[in-house]
Image (tube, grey):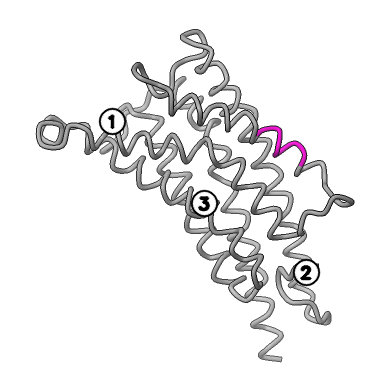
Amino acid sequence: MAATNLKRIGAYAGFIGHVALSIVFFSVFAIFLGFFNYPYLPYFGSNIFAAVFFAFGMISFLGGALFLYVTADAGMAWNYRIPLVGLAAVITLSSFLSPALQTRGVLAVLPGLGLVMAMAGSYAIVLLAPAAVLFFHSLRPIRRSDIGIHVVLSLGVSLVSALLFLGLLLQTGGPLHPYPEESGYGLWFWIYLAVGMPLVGAFVLASSAKGESAGVDAGREERVYENP
């Protein structure tokens, strides 16, 4: 009986962590609301971009860490889940430190550190889609005869993210996140942010249902989040 209860608790904890891991993909909706309301936030001020990615990234990182802990005995597939959780951690840290690193005193001592952290966060954002494909592989190994539509579409979004990653590498000046009317890179970045990321996030969220059903039924012999 005790083992059954522990299995149920582990299953629900894994499900909650899995759902929370998808939150960072939906950051754009809060960013849009912030642009309309122009709130002034403690510490972040009017930097809506950093504030939203810090809050959503933190939720995803903590949820992802919980998911990794619960599924630690999942074998080699477990390793494919680490990049997505790691990117959520980078986004959280970068978003939190960026405002502090832009102060006059820090800029005078470490003029390039703020740019490095901002670039790290930008790289992490555009790499979320490829990391999600690896995450899907950890849940159900990808075979030629069994490639779901969620993997195909996520790979398509990953192609856009790869071009954005290349654009960041080649960028020599100007804002890291330009508006669509400012450049072609800005247009594709906001398409990725507004369409690609929520689409992949929806697939990550939908995949959590499989994990829940595999573990909460105490009468079955399946392990929580075990690969088929």
From the top left corner, tell me how far across and down residue 175 is, in percent: 37, 19
Q: Disc number at residue 60?
A: 3
Camera-nearest residue between 153 and 33: 153
Amino acid found under the numbered disc labelled 1: Gly
Q: What stretch is highlighted in magenta?
A: 152-157
Give the mark nearer the N terminus: 3 vs 1. 1
Q: Which residue in the structure is indicated by mark 2?
A: 214
Please name the predominant secondary structure of the magenta segment in the image.
helix
Label 3: state its secondary structure.
helix
In the depicted structure, whether residue 206 falls above or below residue 26: below
From the top left corner, tell me how far across and down residue 58 is, in percent: 44, 50
Camera-nearest residue between 226 and 17: 226
In the depicted structure, whether residue 205 falls above or below residue 219: above
Mark 1: give few (<14), some (14-19) or many (20+) Cα within 10 Å: few
Q: Mark 1 or mark 2, which is nearer to you?
A: 2
From the top left corner, tell me how far across and down residue 224 is, in percent: 71, 73
Give the mark nearer the N terminus: 1 vs 2. 1
Q: Which residue is drawn at 34% across and 17% down?
A: 173
Q: Mark 3 or mark 1, which is nearer to you?
A: 3
| Residue found farthest to the top | 181
Label 1: state its secondary structure.
loop
Marks 1,2: beta carbons within 8 A: no
| Residue found farthest to the bottom | 1
- Spatial distance from mark 2 to mark 3, Cα to Cα? 22 Å
Give the mark nearer the N terminus: 2 vs 3. 3
Q: Quadrant of the C terminus?
A: bottom right
Camera-nearest residue between 225 and 1: 225
Residue 156 colored in magenta in the image: yes
Camera-nearest residue between 178 and 47: 178
Q: Which residue in the structure is indicated by mark 1?
A: 45
